[in-house]
Image: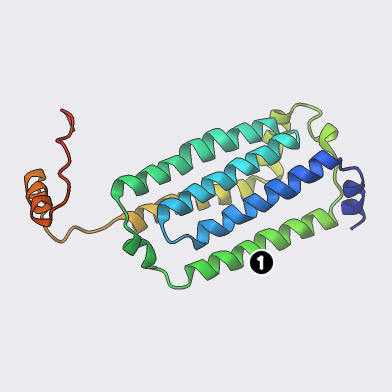
């Protein structure tokens, strides 16, 4: 705890305000990710949480990691998941149907039991080296050395989790079609019978 006390004593007012404001928003976004009833809203909440994490990385001097967080995770992976969910057209009824029972409680338990406790325990037991020593040879070089030496197994496990998340997103959004898809003309006739507004024809090539 002496390390945490020393770090707190050297934290400026701006850093403290930034941490508590953005940290609160990040926690709310993480909770919204698992509590939202629609898959699109959950994906947007997770994307917002990732952007806030990138701001934390940039504020702590990990510029390369912050840029990667925005470009790769938020800009590529999360947007890919979001577009897949929107293009497949998962409705609210599908989002409410949980194929894995208790997955929300399991996600909360893993988040609180593993990430939070392990993070606080790691910060309490180990001494901080500081940004100057960590970035002595360059932020990219220091990050690469840690990833491919000390934390290589954690890095591989993270990659496996990302692949599992991608496969899970495909499984959750996949729906077997049990009947023939209606043509555009049949959909238009159905709208006329129901008294709904008829949309114009799509552009050429669609």
Height in image: 72 above or below 85? above
> Residue drawn at (71%, 45%), measured in percent from left and top?
150
x and y percentages locating residue 44 in the rendered image? 48, 47
> Residue drawn at (47%, 50%), measured in percent from left and top?
43
Snapshot colouring: rainbow
Farthest residue toward the bottom?
Answer: 101
Is residue 31 something that shows in the picture?
yes
Of the pair 118 and 48, the residue shown nearer to us: 48
Q: Which element carries disc 1, helix, strand or loop? A: helix
For the residue carrying disc 1, how many other residues have a C-alpha within 10 Å: few (<14), some (14-19), or many (20+)? Answer: few
Of the pair 195 and 124, the residue shown nearer to us: 195
x and y percentages locating residue 146 in the rendered image? 71, 40
> Residue drawn at (89%, 52%), measured in percent from left and top?
3
Viewport quadrant of the N terminus: bottom right
In the image: residue 74, left or right of residue 86: right
For residue 107, what is the image quadrant?
Answer: bottom right
For the image, the number of numbered tags is 1
Of the pair 197 and 83, the residue shown nearer to us: 197
Height in image: 5 above or below 130? below
Is residue 148 something that shows in the picture?
no
Of the pair 90 and 73, the residue shown nearer to us: 90
x and y percentages locating residue 76 in the rendered image? 47, 37
> Residue drawn at (85%, 45%), measured in percent from left and top?
128
Q: Which residue is mark 1?
A: 113
In the image: residue 75, left or right of residue 201: right
x and y percentages locating residue 68 in the rendered image? 59, 34
In the image: residue 148, left or right of residue 85: right
In the image: residue 100, left or right of residue 162: left
Height in image: 45 above or below 143? below
Viewport quadrant of the C terminus: top left
């Amino acid at each position: 705890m002496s390390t945490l006390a020393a770090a707190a004593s050297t934290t400026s007012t701006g850093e403290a305000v930034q941490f508590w404001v953005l940290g609160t928003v990040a926690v709310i976004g993480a909770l919204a990710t698992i509590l939202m009833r629609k898959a699109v809203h959950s994906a947007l909440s997770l994307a917002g949480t990732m952007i806030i994490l990138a701001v934390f990385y940039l504020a702590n001097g990990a510029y390369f990691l912050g840029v990667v967080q925005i470009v790769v995770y938020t800009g590529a992976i999360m947007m890919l998941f979001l577009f897949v969910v929107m293009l497949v057209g998962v409705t609210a009824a599908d989002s409410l149907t949980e194929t894995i029972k208790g997955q929300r409680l399991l996600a909360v338990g893993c988040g609180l039991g593993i990430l939070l406790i392990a993070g606080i325990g790691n910060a309490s037991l180990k001494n901080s080296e500081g940004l100057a020593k960590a970035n002595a040879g360059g932020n990219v070089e220091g990050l690469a050395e840690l990833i491919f030496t000390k934390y290589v197994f954690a890095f591989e496990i993270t990659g496996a989790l990302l692949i599992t998340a991608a496969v899970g997103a495909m499984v959750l959004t996949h729906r077997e079609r049990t009947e023939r898809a209606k043509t555009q003309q049949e959909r238009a006739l159905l709208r006329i019978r129901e008294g709904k507004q008829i949309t114009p024809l799509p552009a050429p090539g669609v």
